[in-house]
Amino acid sequence: MFRAVEEVLLRLKELLFPSIADVAVLPVDVNTAIVRVDAQCTADGAVCPVCGTWSNRFHGSYLRFPADVPSGGRRVVLQLRVRRFTCENPGCARCTFVEQIRGLSRRHSQRTERLRSTLASVGLALAGRAGARIASVLGVSVSRSTVLRLVVTAPATGPPGTPRPPPGPPPSETWRDRPTPSPVCR
């Protein structure tokens, strides 16, 4: 019986996080509107984002609730237990730091990387207002400003070496801003 449960959890992990290593899927709670997936990182430690020193000195842990791509018309929310580590480098400016799971979480993010890239793709195809409408049909509540912000912060998707224009509003040109045409002499 216990072996069957382990096999189901392993298959669930492969289904939910196919390309993410070091993640353990704990119980999954399916509601009428929300699927809550409990997960945690299984790595021994983490790298300090400031000095790059590996640390396995456990300081504490807390829960994060990033939204994920909807499944079967239901919102998916991760209940991700992340650990806080103490940096072992005495000269480092940061005393403690939180592990980030590559491909799943990002610092201060409320969405998984999968949902971020999905919303950025929708925003790139449809822009703000229409992208927000399609996202709500897909089961993700997001504003048009957020869709546009995700497009601006998304990595460039052109051939390598193609420069990306800097983020910001497009240059405005009104009839007052245009240079006056020089008179033509005949």
Image (cartoon, rainbow, N blue to C red):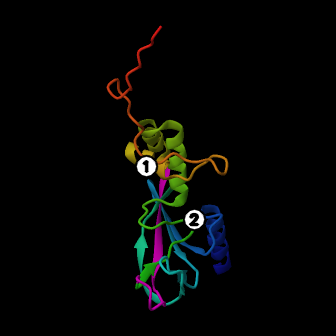
Highlighted range, magenta: 71-94
Horizontal side of 170 relative to 73 (left or right) equals left
Horizontal side of 12 relative to 143 (left or right) equals right
Circles 1 and 2 in contact, beta carbons < 8 Å: no
Q: Is residue 141 visible?
A: no
Determine the residue positioned at 41% across, 20% down.
Answer: 181
Membership of 72 in magenta stretch? yes
For the residues carrying marks 1 and 2, which lies nearer the camera in this image? 1
Separation (CA) of disc 1 from disc 2:
19 Å
Membership of 178 in magenta stretch? no
Q: Amino acid at mark 1?
A: Arg
Determine the residue positioned at 44% across, 43% down.
Answer: 136
Sequence-first disc among 1 and 2: 2
- The numbered disc on residue 103 is 2
Q: Is residue 165 visible?
A: yes
Image spot of residue 183 (x, y percent): 41, 15
- The numbered disc on residue 149 is 1
Q: Where is 7 relative to 112, above or below?
A: below
Determine the residue positioned at 63% across, 74% down.
Answer: 5
Between residue 31 and residue 111, name the one nearer to us. Answer: 111
Horizontal side of 126 relative to 18 (left or right) equals left
- The quadrant of the image that shows the N terminus is bottom right
Determine the residue positioned at 55% across, 57% down.
Answer: 114
Q: Residues within 10 Å of mark 2 (few under 14, many from 20)?
A: few
